[in-house]
Amino acid sequence: MEIVRVEENKWNYRELLLLADPSEEIVNRYLSGGELFVVLEDGRAIAEAVVDPAGEVKNLAVVPDRQGTGIGRMLLDRLCEHYRGRFECLSVGTAEAGVAYYEKCGFHYSHTVKNFFTDNYPEPILDNGILCVDMIYLKRQL
């Protein structure tokens, strides 16, 4: 398994990107200026993360058949190593259903943006059957 930084043809990983964010328009906005990291296993992309220039993890996804195996956490740990010295912390915005996951990965609550998902997405978004309304931000010190 290896982690590579993708600098060209980022949209080739659209299936993974859209697992974490269903809006192609919004993904395109942060993908162009963000750094994309992909986890490859036997040549297959099994996970990805996009980090914007301010140190926010804008997108994190693991293919369904590998979720729950620690790959996402490993990728986050590697990103923290990579960005240590460049940022004081990494931040991530998630819906309520994702908070516990990020807390297990060492992130701590920062703040909430009320109605983020309902104000910024044309269609309702469900995460594990829960309607996404507020964006909850968490930070991890580097």
Image (cartoon, grey):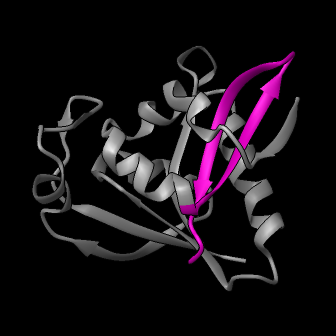
Is 51 contained in the magenta span?
Answer: yes
Tell me if 131 is positioned left or right of 27 in this view. left
Q: Quadrant of residue 23?
A: top left
* Residue 45 image position (x, y, % from top left): 71, 25
Q: Quadrant where the C terminus lies? A: bottom right
Tell me if 34 is positioned left or right of 59 in this view. right
Is 36 contained in the magenta span?
Answer: yes
* Residue 54 image position (x, y, % from top left): 56, 77
Question: Which residue is drawn at the image coordinates 69% and 82% (left, top)?
Answer: 87
| Number of callouts | 0
When the figure is inspected, residue 16 is found, relative to residue 21, above or below; the finding is: above
When the figure is inspected, residue 110 is found, relative to residue 11, above or below; the finding is: below
Question: Which residue is drawn at the image coordinates 54% and 36% (left, top)?
Answer: 61
Q: Quadrant of residue 69?
A: top right
Q: Quadrant where the N terminus lies? A: top right
When the figure is inspected, residue 78 is found, relative to residue 92, above or below; the finding is: above
Question: Which residue is drawn at the image coordinates 41% and 47% (left, top)?
Answer: 27
Predominant SS along the magenta part: strand
Q: 99 and 125: which one is in front?
A: 125
Q: 22 and 100: which one is in front?
A: 22
* Residue 116 image position (x, y, % from top left): 19, 62
Q: Which residues are magenta?
A: 33-54
* Residue 119 image position (x, y, % from top left): 11, 59
When the figure is inspected, residue 112 is found, relative to residue 49, above or below; the finding is: below
